[in-house]
């Protein structure tokens, strides 16, 4: 593919070009082309084991691709050294599939972790920022608890607090609602939506859940057999669905199509 | 290079052997025979790389003394009860056997020296290392393994924290520092166990026994044990961290990594023990006094 960097764009915060990644003989990502729109909620859907988590880890440099480029605000982050990638990572917050809170730390220590690691701030300031954020996310009174003492939904919210505390520009969510009951799912969806609006961040959300995808997504991209086979606004996607997307959407029962591929 | 026309390269086989099959036979035999040693070498190399990285991070900021203290507490204070218990009974059993053997020659007063030296050189460092492998090594492998599968290690990276510096370096350094201390504790408690059996229960004369112990025991007996224990600490912590850090998959894999940490850790302590005796005997020759 072309090696020329795409022009720095106001509209696209992250641009992925011709990204390939193999683990041993397994070719997981096969030429990903993906654009993430600034300030919007971008959803990546795809079946289990299609490489969604792997793709997301590439976006903030947790994995290095075999070939290809990832431009974050126009800067290619592939092959940056430790220090440079550290700077890039400060733009990101990530909410992992299983929250990934530190078991050995309580909620306050978890949420404060990015601040205590990155800056020398007075303790009082850290505490007030942590308290403030927990309050905003509807988590009062959990400060001294340990992750093991929280429910799955609360753990996700604490993980979100930890991802948000250093005011990132981009938030990555890996399957935020998997394993939650429908009510908790709805709450987390609302939380993602509200976070996007209140904090003005660009969100990238990996999801299996078609209902939430169409509820909160501004843009949707479908990962199938190592490539993005369809992407656009929900309306664009449903207007002319790719067969794989159609099957995915239909089996989930969120949207139905007639024989000609129109939405019922 | 060749004098003939450049066709396909001649297969390097002995004459009379069908060329189509022999390479595969050779390769098969070679891979069966060399597989295990090569695997061992590869694993050894990976351990050394992890160790190199962990040590290199000691001198690079940011420094987090709290993590080191926490690990020293986990390895040391946490293992104190088991080390005390095992130390006491090791000293006691050792005294029991020594006394019954020395009784044949009416030489029981040598019990203090005999038990003291065997504790100092062998029993204390090896048993302490085995106890700490079972308790702290398994704990490290489990903790790092579950941090790996629940993506806590990845999440450290997202905050631009190096997971080796944050997790592996403190564990290895703390274990190296704490092991000699625990070995000294084992020595002291072991002598207490010996005292109870030999002096209290078998009525060996304490004045004579302690006199002989003081006269014949050399500081080098203790130095040897302590140097060995520090090396054991390095080996067991490195093994445990390697196993935990490299878990792939689910909870079952964490369990298997923990088992491997204990088995490989214990085996490497015993194997290293032999080589360390050989090496240390160059510095302090046997019977040198
Ligand atoms: N570090 C790794 N080493 C080797 N293989 C890996 C690694 N990470 C992922 N894989 C493989 O890559 C493939 C895609 O994994 P990934 O976790 O991205 O799937 P996913 O789309 O997120 O699935 P799920 O919805 O189940 O989370 C899987 O087959 C997985 O085994
Ligand atoms: Mg995943």
Image (cartoon, coloured by chain):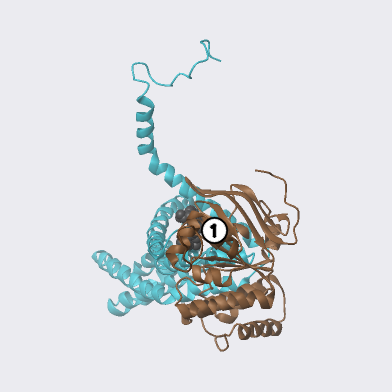
Q: Position of residue A1 (x, y in %)?
A: 65, 43
Badge 1 local density, few (<14 within 10 Å), some, or many (20+)?
many
Asked where in the image residue B106 lies, by quadrant, the reply is bottom left
Q: SS at mark 1?
A: strand
Q: Position of residue B168 (x, y in %)?
A: 54, 63
Which residue is situated farthest in the bottom direction here? Answer: A141
Which residue is situated farthest in the left direction here? Answer: B104
Picture layout, residue B54 above or below residue A139: above
Q: Chain of mark 1?
A: A
Quadrant where the image shows the N terminus of chain B: top right
Describe residue A236's horizontal placement relative to residue B227 as left or right: right
Asked if residue A98 shows in the view, the reply is: no
Asked if residue A13 shows in the view, the reply is: yes
Q: Position of residue B208 (x, y in %)?
A: 37, 73
Q: How many marks?
A: 1
Picture layout, residue A27 above or below residue A105: above
Residue at screen point 67% across, 76% down: A197
Residue at screen point 64% across, 85% down: A131
Describe residue A184's horizontal placement relative to residue B22 as left or right: right
- Residue nearest the observer in this picture, B50 or A179: A179
Chain B: give its colour: cyan
Chain A: give its colour: brown
**Residue at mark 1: C-beta within 8 A of ligand 1:** no
Residue at screen point 44% across, 75% down: B80
Q: Position of residue B182 (x, y in %)?
A: 47, 70
- Residue nearest the observer in this picture, A46 or B214: A46
Picture layout, residue B15 above or below residue A41: above
Asked where in the image residue B196 lies, by quadrant, the reply is bottom left
Residue at mark 1:
A222
């Amino acid at each position: 593919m072309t090696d020329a960097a795409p022009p720095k764009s106001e509209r696209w915060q992250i641009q992925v070009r011709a990204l390939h990644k193999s683990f041993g003989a397994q070719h997981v990502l096969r030429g990903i082309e993906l654009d993430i729109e600034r300030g919007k909620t971008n959803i990546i859907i795809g079946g289990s084991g299609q490489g969604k988590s792997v793709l997301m880890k590439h976006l903030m440099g947790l994995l290095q691709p075999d070939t290809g480029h990832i431009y974050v605000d126009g800067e290619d982050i592939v092959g940056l050294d430790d220090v440079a990638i550290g700077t890039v990572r400060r733009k990101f917050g990530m909410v992992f599939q299983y929250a990934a809170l530190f078991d050995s730390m309580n909620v306050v220590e978890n949420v404060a972790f990015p601040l205590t690691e990155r800056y020398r701030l007075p303790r009082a300031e850290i505490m007030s920022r942590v308290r403030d954020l927990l309050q905003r996310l509807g988590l009062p009174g959990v400060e001294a608890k340990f992750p093991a003492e929280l429910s799955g939904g609360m753990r996700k919210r604490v993980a979100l607090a930890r991802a948000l505390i250093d005011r990132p520009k981009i938030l990555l969510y890996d399957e935020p609602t998997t394993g939650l009951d429908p009510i908790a799912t709805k709450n987390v969806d609302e939380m993602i939506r509200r976070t996007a609006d209140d904090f003005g961040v660009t969100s990238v959300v990996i999801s299996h859940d078609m209902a939430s995808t169409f509820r909160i997504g501004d843009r949707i991209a479908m990962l199938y057999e190592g490539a993005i086979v369809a992407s656009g606004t929900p309306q664009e996607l449903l207007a002319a669905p790719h067969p794989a997307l159609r099957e995915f959407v239909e089996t989930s029962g969120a949207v139905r199509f007639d024989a000609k591929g129109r939405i019922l | 290079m060749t004098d003939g026309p450049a066709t396909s390269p001649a297969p390097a086989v002995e004459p009379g052997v069908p060329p189509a099959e022999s390479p595969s036979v050779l390769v098969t035999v070679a891979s069966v025979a060399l597989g295990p040693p090569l695997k061992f070498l590869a694993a050894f190399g990976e351990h050394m790389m992890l160790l190199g990285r962990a040590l290199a991070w000691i001198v690079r900021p940011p420094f987090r003394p709290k993590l080191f203290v926490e690990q020293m507490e986990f390895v040391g204070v946490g293992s104190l009860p088991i080390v005390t218990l095992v130390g006491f009974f090791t000293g006691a059993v050792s005294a029991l056997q020594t006394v019954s053997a020395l009784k044949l020659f009416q030489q029981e007063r040598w019990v203090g020296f005999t038990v003291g030296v065997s504790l100092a050189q062998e029993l204390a460092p090896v048993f302490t290392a085995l106890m700490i492998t079972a308790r702290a090594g398994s704990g490290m492998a489990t903790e790092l393994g579950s941090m790996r599968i629940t993506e806590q290690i990845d999440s450290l990276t997202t905050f631009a924290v190096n997971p080796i510096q944050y997790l592996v370096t403190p564990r290895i350094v703390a274990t190296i520092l704490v092991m000699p201390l625990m070995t000294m504790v084992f020595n002291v408690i072991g002598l207490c166990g010996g005292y109870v059996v030999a002096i209290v229960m078998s009525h060996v004369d304490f004045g004579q026994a302690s006199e002989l112990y003081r006269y014949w025991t050399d500081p080098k007996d203790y130095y040897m044990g302590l140097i060995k224990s520090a090396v054991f600490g390095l080996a067991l912590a490195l093994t445990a961290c390697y196993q935990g850090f490299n878990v792939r998959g689910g909870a079952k894999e964490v369990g298997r990594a923990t088992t491997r940490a204990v088995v490989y850790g214990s085996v490497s302590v015993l194997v290293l023990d032999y080589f360390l005796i050989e090496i240390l005997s160059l510095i302090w020759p046997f019977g040198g006094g």
